[in-house]
Image (cartoon, rainbow, N blue to C red):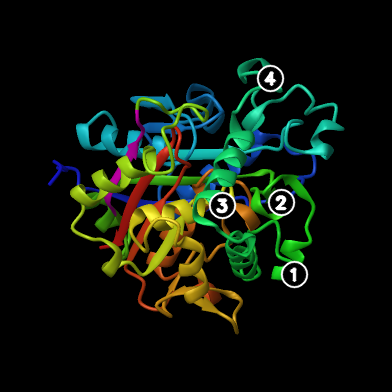
Amino acid sequence: MARNPIKDQIAIVGVGSTGFSRDAGGRSRDSLVAEASIKAIKDAGLGKEDIDGVCGTGLSAREMVSMLGLPEVTHYVNQPVPIAFPIIDAMNAIYSGSCDTALVYHGVYRSPAISRSAAADPFRRGLGFGGQPLGASRRVDPESVEGSVGYTAWASRYLHEYDIKREHLGYVAVNNRSNAARNPLAAMRAPLTMENYLNARMIRDPLCLFDMDVPVDGADAFVLTTAERARDLTDNPVLIHAATAGTIAKNDEDQTPGLHDHGQHVVVKNLREKSDLWIPDVDVYFPYDGFSFITLAWIENTGWCGPGEGGAFLEEHWDKDANRIMIDGRIPVNPHGGALSEGGTQGSGHVREAVVQLRGDAGERQVPGARTALLTPGGFFFNAQGIILRRD
């Protein structure tokens, strides 16, 4: 058993979101982040004077303190995406006493590299990933195997090694679109069929338009504090039971040893050792889906099924009437629509939906009696992550 003294000691007490769209109508990334943050603080029943920790992505934490007018802050840092990195930082800061109540924020903003409309916008032409000035982003040469090129290469290897059908990737995309139809925050809510998927424009073979996350504008934010204080703020705090990240030495896209050895395996091993809860206890599951192939990898490596069996597993647990995945007839997968339909939130949407589900506030998407959520954000090169949340 891995040492985990922070287990169940930190809670998420506030969530806020702008929702996600293909175009925020000329709004800046910073204004979106500010809106989501203010909503999260209000949702927690707190004021800006209660926030003394700030952890986020993209927008400078120091600038965030100034923009929100936070009177006194004792912990303020930036972390890379996906979302578990700043959440883990905030957890550790609160537990150590570096701060008492932390705001975690994440904003996404379409850049010219991933959106034609953004490339045509003179105010966005100089922006890189996440709305950062282009100089802050690494240049990707045509010969590079970074990002989508890397996942395309490994997706090809996966389909070849296990003789996987493209329909198995399609289950991920169709599931997410069916779920997004009931999520008012989602950018893509129009129905998607398997026929639509198979006939879609190929972007990088074997990944088509619907295999890749949707570039969007928007932001999510969360408020974290001690479990003890959380119980004074709300009747249903969501506890962070365990959280971890994982990578291996050869963590570049072109250096990863193979489908059998990468960051996801480190995360699963460590998360299982830290947690009293696992698959039999899960009520709702959130595998990352920045590319559909990542979802199948997480499903297999987490232990829902064996290597190469992810697609067949989804087929076995497919609800034909609802056109979605229901594991054992009761566990939905990414009920908010995930990165492929709500929008490419780098995991913040997954965390927000998990919290909303465990609080019982998901409306028509609500999973009856949901008490435990398993989240596996990130890919498998250098940003694999795992979180288990539970209702107190």
Residue denoted by label 1:
195
Query: Alpha-carbon neighbours of circle 3 within 10 Å: few (<14), some, or many (≥20)?
Result: some
Mark 1 closeness class: few <14, some 14–19, many ≥20 residues within 10 Å? few
Does 270 appear above or below 355? above
Q: Is residue 345 magenta?
A: no
Residues drawn in magenta? 240-248
Q: Earlier in the sequence, mark 2 or mark 3?
A: 3
Instruction: Name the element at disc 2.
Output: strand
Q: Which residue is mark 3?
A: 159
Query: How far apart are labels 4 and 1 at the CA level?
Result: 34 Å
Compare marks 4 and 1 and give the one earlier in the sequence: 4
Task: Name the magenta segment's main secondary structure.
Answer: strand
User: Which mark sits nearer the N-terminus, 2 or 4?
Assistant: 4
Under circle 1, the secondary element is helix
**Which residue is situated farthest in the top direction here?**
135
Q: Quadrant of the C terminus?
A: bottom left
Q: Nearer the viewer, residue 178 or 391?
A: 178
Q: Residues within 10 Å of mark 2 (few under 14, many from 20)?
A: many
Question: Which numbered disc, 1 or 3, marks the residue closer to the eye?
Answer: 3
Instruction: Determine the residue positioned at 62% across, 41% down.
Output: 152
Q: State the residue at coordinates (63%, 64%).
A: 167
User: Which residue bears the numbered disc 4?
Assistant: 141
Q: Viewed as shown, does residue 22 lie left or right of 91?
A: right
Give the amino acid at mark 2: Cys
How far is the residue under mark 2 from the one under mark 3?
14 Å
**Mark toward the start of the polypeptide (2 vs 1):** 1
Q: How crowded is the residue under tag 4: few (<14 C-alpha within 10 Å), some, or many (20+)?
A: few
The residue to which callout 2 is attached is 208
Residue 189 in view, yes or no? yes
User: Dividing the picture into quarters, in which one does residue 250 lie?
Assistant: top left
Q: Amino acid at mark 3?
A: Leu
Q: CA distance from mark 2 to mark 4?
A: 22 Å
